[in-house]
Amino acid sequence: MVKTLYSKNTILKSQIRSGNVVGVMKKGAEEVRIHSRFYDPIMETDDFFLKYLLHKVLSMNVISTNVNTDSDDSYHDLLAFMFPIYLNLAMEKGVYKEYVKNKYNDANVKGPINIARHIKSDTPFMGRIAYDAREYSYDNHLTQLIRHTIEKLNSEYIYDFSSDFLTRANMQNIIHETPNYIRIERFEVLSDNFANPVRHGYYQEYYLLQKLCIQILNEEKIGFGNEDDEVHGIIIDVAWLWEEYLNTLLTEKFIHPENKNSQYGIKLFSDMNTTVYPDFYSKNRRVVLDAKYKKLDEKGINREDRYQIISYLHVLKANKAGIAFPSELGQMGIQRAGQLKGFGGSLFKLPLKIPQRVSTYDEFVSLIKNNEKIFFSKLFEV
């Protein structure tokens, strides 16, 4: 039996509201699907809005793959969506490098002689010597694991990296640095990585990527619990997806601070070390923009959000501060929310219209791309 929920911000007596999460969970024959609030059950189609966000943020073409968020194994398929972003985060540290033991049989001895192998391979003696060398190499058990994962995903899915040079480049780097890749050695590579997880704290991102690759290659499901009580599933914070999606639209014009990486934050006080992280800001245009996955079409900016963007506006000496949100109504363009007294400045709301009542994903993409252009042009009228 399948139960469907919708990501909302309220709790009603007759329904379960899930907050800002989407995904799917399954226990035995019972399955719970949590759609975005833009999912239209009347049209009996997929959650186009969620698919589009995953496509834009995780750099995967959902149309050209067998991924189906309404299938029984959707929580397993969605692991493939996670691979590009985990890869990119890990590759920020560079290609993983470690000491490996290589076997040689030549005249340029640069390591301890392997007597048994030498007698077996070089009798009678022809000028070559069998020896082992411990070398610092990019071609190691972890990069081989990533390579096997790339090859598996490329055989099962069609990636679309036309707008994502970084992911395409990182995958090519891994392929280039693993010339010893042999497909039939997948089981040995998996076993080696399972027994030797990445332990160094500096490579935490590679540890997470390693776990994901093992799950993909083993075709595991994500779960928690024990034996028959185990629950499989995947849960995604749609508010985070919305923010990262906006970053794909604004990346060339706005700074997008990264709280987890402590980058591009702003100092809140001159005499204390307190750093805050607005979602987006432009010093040149003197604009601050906060991403909110909220229903703000017929509502004003609430007190907490208002005070938050006012503080950013003041510290950055900006002229305007606003909130970008997904809209269910047809109105697009700047919605004035008040002129500040004191040091001045104005507040605004900026909706991005999410297409409704569409029957195909192609139609949804065409409509939302047009809405993105309007959103972008209206933002720079601020």
Image (tube, rainbow, N blue to C red):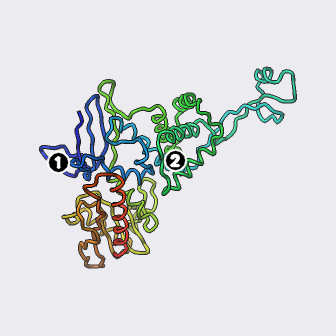
- Judge by depth and name the residue closer to the eye, 53 or 300: 53
Task: Report the front residue among 196 and 169.
Answer: 169
Give coordinates of residue 176: x percent, y percent. 63, 45
| Disc number for residue 261 | none
Q: Residue at x 56, y 40 (%)?
A: 147
> Against 327, is 223 above or below?
above
Mark toward the start of the polypeptide (2 vs 1): 1
The residue wearing badge 2 is: 90
Please state the horizontal and vertical placement of residue 262, each as a whole percent of the image.
45, 57
Q: Quadrant of residue 345?
A: bottom left
Q: Amino acid at mark 1?
A: Ile
Question: Label 2 amino acid?
Answer: Ala
For image coordinates 32% across by 35% down, the residue present is 72
Residue 243 % position (x, y): 36, 57
Q: Is residue 281 left or right of residue 29?
A: right
Give SS at disc 2.
helix
Q: SS class of the residue under badge 1?
A: loop
Considering only vertical position in the picture, is 25 above or below 172?
Answer: above
From the viewer's perspective, tell me whether residue 359 is left or right of residue 280. left
Mark 1 Cα-neighbour bin, 10 Å: few <14, some 14–19, many ≥20 = few
Q: Where does label 1 land, which residue?
A: 11
In the displayed structure, 74 sits above or below 243; it is above
Res 381 → quadrant: bottom left
Residue in the image at 41% along x and 70% along y: 282
Q: CA distance from mark 2 to mark 1?
A: 38 Å
> Residue 23 location in percent, x, y?
31, 43
Relative to the observer, which residue lies in front, 147 or 282? 147
Q: Residue at x 12, y 44 (%)?
A: 13
